Image (spheres, rainbow, N blue to C red):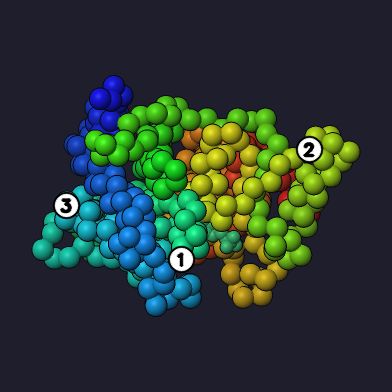
Amino acid sequence: MHHGTTITQFIAEEQRHAPGATGEFTALLNDIVTACKMISNQVNHGALVGALGSAGSENIQGETQKKLDVLSNQMFIQCTEWSGHVGAMASEEMDEIYEIPKEYPRGKYLLTFDPLDGSSNIDVNVSVGTIFSILRMADTDGDATERDFLKAGTEQVAAGYALYGPSTMMVLTTGNGVNGFTLDQNIGEFILTHPNMTIPTETAEFAINASNGRFWEAPVKRYVDECLAGKEGPRGKDFNMRWIASMVAEVHRILTRGGVFMYPVDAKMVEKGLGGKLRLLYEANPMSFVVEQAGGASITGKERIMEMQPEGLHQRVPVILGSRDEVERLQGYHNEG
Ligand code: AHM
Ligand code: MG
């Protein structure tokens, strides 16, 4: 017996207070919830259902796709394309935008998603997740084009992630704070367990892939050096470090106990003509929305991520997010440099 609020109930009640809400948005969010439950089930069963290993294909970024990347992408589409609420979708795992098949009605929302983030963790049984964002289509006459997706993060209607960890969680914002739900496997429902999540401002933990240290830009190097210097250094306190290689798990930790996450642009990326590692539309924007709504901040170094005008579907950007004070310190270092 559960005594909590289910995610369905929570979303419906939130929408009841939104003027002019038709119920379409509630229905779309519910379909996304179903997709995440299905992906969670596959991830949980792993090798038992033959879901591990490589799919033998590459995505547009030249990364090898895992079977679960491909499966999760299919599940996300299947759960959301039929409803009549979606105009088109874009995913990290698809080269082009996905148009809604002609047999289904088209709706007014655009969906972007990373169906399985942190996929290098799949085969080693470490946390992975799904990241999603919902945008409103400016013009619902005619077919959606790539251009319709190139909207600043501030235009997002909702965003969130599902984390497939020791428990499966769904964390969601519709621009009115951040709420976390835990999947009760017995009843198949997400229950509100983490209402009004806020990022602590006081923190002494940072996350970065230190193996790229020699390629980092100077402001990031300075920040990390100062953390590493601990009590004796300019920060006057000892810091802890974490790197899970799963942005969802990293952001979830920051939402829970604070800290800062960095995937800066580095010399190696610049050489390849890349603007960063993480993708603006599928990772950086939705996570920035969640983090800002929880009282944190999210920047590229100099600018607020959510104010960037996207230039391409698969555009990559530097990401620095987390506890406000730390992000502001990093911004200060970038402005000086
Ligand atoms: P993916 O979407 O291809 O799985 O990659 C994105 C992930 C992030 O979740 C994580 O922060 C980063 O890539 C890990 O990078 P690295 O392999 O350099 O540690
Ligand atoms: Mg990803």
Element under label 2? loop
Q: In the current view of this chain or complex, which residue is farthest to the right?
A: 232
Between disc 1 and disc 3, whose residue precedes? 3
Does 96 sit above or below residue 261? below
Q: What residue does disc 3 label?
A: 84
For image coordinates 60% across by 30% down, the residue present is 200
Residue 282 position, x and y percent, is 43, 56
Q: Disc 1 to disc 3, how far (Cα)?
A: 25 Å
Image quarter in which the C terminus is found? bottom right
Q: Disc 2 to disc 1, how far (Cα)?
A: 38 Å
Q: In the current view of this chain or complex, which residue is farthest to the top?
A: 3
Element under label 3? loop
Between disc 3 and disc 2, whose residue precedes? 3
The answer to the question of whether label 1 and label 3 lie on touching residues, with beta carbons closer than 8 A, is: no
Determine which of the numbered discs, if any, sits on residue 238 in the image: 2
The amino acid type found where label 1 is placed reads His
Does 156 sit above or below residue 95? above
Q: Disc 3 to disc 2, how far (Cα)?
A: 53 Å
Between disc 2 and disc 1, whose residue precedes? 2
The amino acid type found where label 3 is placed reads Gly
The amino acid type found where label 2 is placed reads Asp
Residue 276 relative to residue 79: left or right: right
In the image, 109 versus 40, the foreground residue is 40
For image coordinates 89% across by 38% down, the residue present is 232
Residue 245 position, x and y percent, is 56, 56
Residue 239 visible here: yes
Does 67 sit above or below residue 199? below
Q: Is mark 2 within 8 Å of ligand 1?
A: no
